[in-house]
Image (spheres, coloured by chain):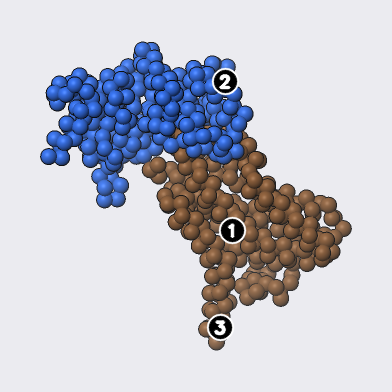
Chain colours: A blue, B brown
Amino acid sequence: MIRTCALAKRFGRVDALRGIDLDLASGAVTGIVGPNGAGKTTFIKILLGLTRPDSGVVAFDGQPIGADVHYRSRIGYMPQIARYPENLRVGELFDLVRDVRGADPAHPIDDELIERFALRELFDRPLRVLSGGTRQKVNAALAFAFHPDLLILDEPTAGLDPVASATLKDKILAERQDGRTVIVTSHIMSELEELCDDIVFLLEGAVRFAGSVREIKSTTRQTSLERAVATLMIREVA
Amino acid sequence: MRVVAQVVKYQLRDASRSRWLMVYTAFFLLATEGLLRFTGDGEKTLLSLMTVVLFVVPLVTLVLGTVYLYGAREFTELLLAQPVSRRSLFAGLYLGLTLPLTAAITAGVGIPLLAHPATIGAQQGAFVVLLLVGVALTALFTAIAFVIAVRTDDRLRGLTAGIGVWLAFALVYDGLVLVLITVFSDFPLERPLLAATFVNPIDLARVLLLLRLDVSALMGYTGAVFQRFFGSGLGAAAAGGALLCWIVVPIALGARAFVRKDF
């Protein structure tokens, strides 16, 4: 579904990405892992067109992304930080995103997370009074609401309580069952092991491993993803 | 266009519940109403109100504008992740910020004026110019706030830059003009001072208003030079045109920076 070719990006004197070639399979959950500053967020932002690469190409379903913004109507994005205009209400935020996406108001949205997170009763509340965790729930519900083909989730369970976190993971797996593609970053390896088909390991802006969860375990001879990634990191440093 | 309208619509809702905007409106209501009552005279009210508008509008617009934009940073990213073009989103955010501020000053100054038609008397036209100037300064300094907030990622530095811009136009400029006049008092200064006026939109706004009033004593040096050089009619056209450029250029710069930015 997404292919990147020689994607490179510099911020000042820092090489955030140095030549990323990836082919992210359709209908799979791909976890992007790596230490802080490895380039995970920059990579995601380039996929979304929030950041422009210095060189290289991103192709979405074979079409290079460029000036055309339409491909983003097929993406649901859950950012890491959720801050919204203070005086807007929860329900208005959903309406705003729907209207901006040009989604038909008559067409029902996917409200499973809205219901399971009990957000509907908060629709009249201003966004500023919500707790951080609740805002993160709004964020998640918003990413899934418009039936996107591709979900991009940046640290989705950070700040969620265990129940909400489990609900979200169930939802991700259900979407995968329905044939949707998911890209997820996380620092919690056990969580990625639960969710992912494939793993991409980024280090200092380069891909050090890309393959299935089983492959990463067998090449490192470890039984858990956490130990496998740790082994890769140590090997790289040494 | 649809995206622009939608973004503006929700921003207006957000703004209509903003406490800061209410304070800003109330400030103009009280200042205008108070001046009209205490002076009981249209021209005196106009001159005092002019000073208030020329100082307060740029400052409040810059501060509220940059603070809003920094606060809306993640929100902007969320909207950019939707199928919207950067240009439409810029237009939506810009209008969504300018329109409420414009409404605040128009209502705050306009309502008391409508309530005291007798006091205003013959100054109607000048008050309209005052409102127009207030709107122009709002549009202009919102655009400058955009340029600052888009180009500076650090909030504190952005806010400092905003206040710095205000200080430069509202205070430092006058000081420099004064220094120029005293140091070069033996030289003909008309043309340099005329040129200086075009560099400062706040001064242009002041000149534009004073040309309507014909009170040369209050014009300050640049205003007097302006009138002598252009005469009232041509002077107003020149100042108005220059002010328009001052609006268009920062908007273009802001849009350019927004379109090119890496979020």
Q: Which mark is residue A105?
A: 2
Provide the chain ID for the residue under circle 3: B
Q: Residue furthest right?
A: B118
Task: Choose top left, top right, bottom left or bottom right for residue B9.
Answer: top right
Q: Is residue A20 visible?
A: no
Residue type, label 1 = Leu
Q: Position of residue B57 (x, y in %)?
A: 63, 57
Q: Which residue does the image show at 58% across and 62% down from the upper left?
A: B201
Q: How many residues crowd mark 3 within 10 Å: few (<14), some (14–19), many (20+)? A: few
Q: Is B198 drawn above or below residue A193 in the view shown? A: below
Q: For this rendering, which residue is in front, B28 or B99?
A: B28
| The C terminus of chain A lies in quadrant | top left
Q: Residue furthest front?
A: A162
Q: Position of residue B242 (x, y in %)?
A: 58, 60
Q: Which mark is residue A57?
A: none
The residue pinned by badge 3 equals: B182
The residue pinned by badge 1 equals: B59
Q: Is residue B216 left or right of residue A163?
A: right
Provide the chain ID for the residue under circle 2: A
Q: How many residues crowd mark 1 within 10 Å: few (<14), some (14–19), many (20+)? A: many
**Mark 1 or 3, closer to the camera:** 1
Kind of element beneath mark 2: loop
Q: Position of residue B258 (x, y in %)?
A: 45, 45
Assess whether mark 2 and mark 3 are in contact (beta carbons under 8 angstroms): no
